Image (spheres, coloured by chain):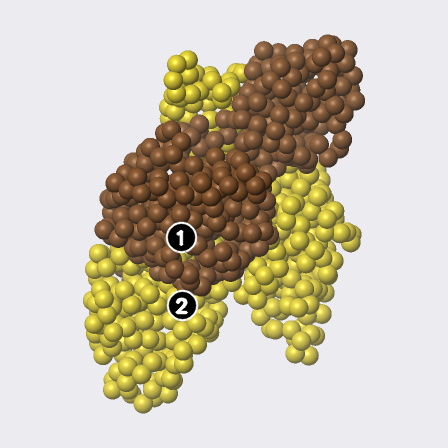
Chain colours: A brown, B yellow
Amino acid sequence: MSLTQSSAGSIASTASVAARRLAVLSNAERNEALTALYEGLLANKDAILAANAKDVALASRAAEDGDLNSSVLKRLDLSRPGKYDDMLQGILSVRDLTDPIGNVTLRTLLDDGLTLERVSCPIGVLLIIFEARPEVIANIAALSIKSGNAAILKGFSHIPALGGKESTESFVAISTVISQAISSTRVPKSSIQLVQTRDVVSSLLAQDTLIDLVIPRGSNDLVRFVKDNTKIPVLGHADGLCSAYVHHDADLDVSVKVLVDSKTDYPAACNSLETLLVNEAVLRTILPTVAKALVAKGVTLKCDEPSKGALADTLDSADMNSIVDAVESDYNTEFLDLILAIKTIPASAPGSGVDAAIDHINTHSSKHTDIILTKSKATADYFMSSIDSAGVFWNASTRFADGMRYGFGTEVGISTNKIHSRGPVGLDGLTIYKYLVRGDGHRAGDYFDGVGGKKWKHEVLPL
Amino acid sequence: MSLTQSSAGSIASTASVAARRLAVLSNAERNEALTALYEGLLANKDAILAANAKDVALASRAAEDGDLNSSVLKRLDLSRPGKYDDMLQGILSVRDLTDPIGNVTLRTLLDDGLTLERVSCPIGVLLIIFEARPEVIANIAALSIKSGNAAILKGFSHIPALGGKESTESFVAISTVISQAISSTRVPKSSIQLVQTRDVVSSLLAQDTLIDLVIPRGSNDLVRFVKDNTKIPVLGHADGLCSAYVHHDADLDVSVKVLVDSKTDYPAACNSLETLLVNEAVLRTILPTVAKALVAKGVTLKCDEPSKGALADTLDSADMNSIVDAVESDYNTEFLDLILAIKTIPASAPGSGVDAAIDHINTHSSKHTDIILTKSKATADYFMSSIDSAGVFWNASTRFADGMRYGFGTEVGISTNKIHSRGPVGLDGLTIYKYLVRGDGHRAGDYFDGVGGKKWKHEVLPL
């Protein structure tokens, strides 16, 4: 792990060399490095927390001066109960996951003595740009090593400063420990490089021949900045504009439970509900109960005319204080707050409204997670095929869109990409495959139709 | 299929709407459209060949004037024996492939009544830019429909003209037939849009919110132009700089067979051999026989000093006429011709030379297909893990890197990307997946550690 200032080119090429060495290590060798990482961070807990305390003190002053968001301050503090232990436990959890490398997913006998295999392998070099959270370094280092990828890590605090400055002491302390821990193992030291240089991000984003994938972890602005400034493939999501559609046959109790959880469980999360589409037929049956429950949780509802009218007729005046008029841009807004945009879907629209809901979502949502509330399996199936999003749920909260909840053990991030990896990305998303052919002097020119030509066998072999 | 001039934005948004309709059709409905396509092209063979003859006549005049490459002319001619029938048969082959859509690849019981599924689905809207070959339209239309994707097709002839002009008559004839054929089925007409406007490519490449994947099929220049001019993910390969390494323990006969086939079977192909790395230990044993066989096939060998010296001592003077001095840039050149660059690997290098060969290949090759010739399984395995390419072969010709030869039935192209799809891309490369969660009012907030919290089941269910 290099802590010195170096050029983006040399960082990327060092990482590239390390990646090739990592690619030939066994699972046991990679796991050994993760154990060393765990032990190093455990043994150096006091020193790391002391370094972190300096960062927190510095950041607290910035927060008092109004120069730093208090949530950034909170995320920075490694001394909060359980946080350090969670970081340590996370390394062991990643270590104990199934090896994502070397899995044969296709095996074909092309001809006698000539076999084809498709085998999972690391992608190569990852550039991970993340908002200042010191424990993220350990997490990313663990995921990268486990998947056999080299990683260049760049902490990032706010655009346009690109600094990540406020966690430097923690970073240096953690990265020194990681570096020492790795150096006792067969994993090359340059597999994990922490970049401290402030202005190196743009030049790293230009290294598209050496860096294979960029993973920005953080705010919409961060992701958008990265996407707009690189030709390297980017894995992540800028927005989480999740929508729910309440069909005319939705169950009242199910709707209330799912919608309240989707909106209020953790409003700042990318998988929280932002837009509610309500079938006209249930404006006076389901919507008032849903609205009352949401308002009770402190949610402000931004309603179109029909939904507002229905609520005005059914809610008491205290609750009506939380109802405001929606404007068109509300249906394109990720509030990340206790605010929900509500829009009415005409019941006379095709498919009794479901097609209009689908069109709205495919046009306005960010392709993250969208849900339907209906009793009809046929309607749900149609909605689930039609919606072009990473997650499409039936009678379940948007908040289930999460790698831990899906049972992936860990999560690199949530992707709204249309290729490679979509939804919560586990270790598999950090792998690709290669094709291996083994022969014994086989020539392609020997295979042709007609006299004397060899014929393909193309026999599927057991995996 | 729109043949009128329209803006890139309206082309892309029409395609996007069609893609959502396509996504809900069954395999039978998509296959029905492919049958209609086949029947339409069969019934209109004479008219299409007549239109193609006009293009060929025009192109022949351009070729006589030196304005058109004769190979472009040859690729344009649909009347060559078997070509039209191959095009028709190709549609039926694609139709009869296993449905790539709706495959459940993961099923987990998250908790009672709450299930997660990962299901394959179309990517959405493809932009396919290809060099002027009329039968490619039918092939791409078939692949797109089978995989449930909408496709925008743009013929392309030479940079910077971006015209594809010389096949307009064939395109209009074929596309009219495709359009008519599709309109009798449930596949939306705008699923396949042929773009004729000359200057629309750049603006289509800017539609990154509506177009999900660009597939350039053609020359290095075409692929590079596309990669340099879009933020949409690109699937393909610019270069095919394939290398072979002859280890000190390689078998002579196997080496000759594999290397001659790799270089001479079809020198203009992307999977042909361009660089030969020879272990110093076999410069005077294996290399002379290999060189003699290559020279007999008309290959010019561009040698470094040690390999040239070895050949000068062993070949006769007639053969030596085909030996020339290599310059450094030869090891970065895709000759696409009967030329091979040869470089000597010192036997004293780490791994008896295999590490130096690996370093050379990982630095110089285009990550397409690279091979090793060795009797040692351990050396081959090490080489295959270390080489960062889509295909890595042991004692087999580079020319096997091909979707048909791999048994994929069809091939969209060969990808040197590090994510999504690598190597020969079959129908699977045109799909992605989504996560479906089915519940019954489940709330994420109910699951937590501690008193009263629900626990995850995360039970793997059978597929």
Name the image quarter holding the C terminus of chain B. Answer: top left
Chain containing the residue with disc 2: B
Residue drawn at point x = 64 percent, y = 39 percent: B19
Above or below for A274 versus A312: below
Amino acid at dot 2: His
Helix, strand or loop under label 1: strand
Q: In this view, does B229 lie to the left or right of B242?
A: right
Helix, strand or loop under label 2: helix
Expressed as whole percent of the image width and height from the top left, the position of residue A379 reads 62, 21
Expressed as whole percent of the image width and height from the top left, the position of residue A448 reads 42, 59
| Residue located beneath label 1 in the image | A194
Q: In this view, does B396 lie to the left or right of A325?
A: left
Q: In this view, does A289 lie to the left or right of B418?
A: right
Above or below for A190 versus B294: above
Residue drawn at point x = 44 percent, y = 32 percent: A403
| Residue located beneath label 2 in the image | B364
Using the rendered image of the protein, determine whether residue A51 is visible from the camera's viewpoint: yes
Chain containing the residue with disc 1: A
Given residues B97 and A47, the one toward you in this image is A47
Expressed as whole percent of the image width and height from the top left, the position of residue A97 reads 32, 36
Q: Do labels 2 and 1 share a chain?
A: no
Location of residue B317 by image quarter: bottom left
Using the rendered image of the protein, determine whether residue A106 is visible from the camera's viewpoint: no
Expressed as whole percent of the image width and height from the top left, the position of residue A292 reads 66, 13
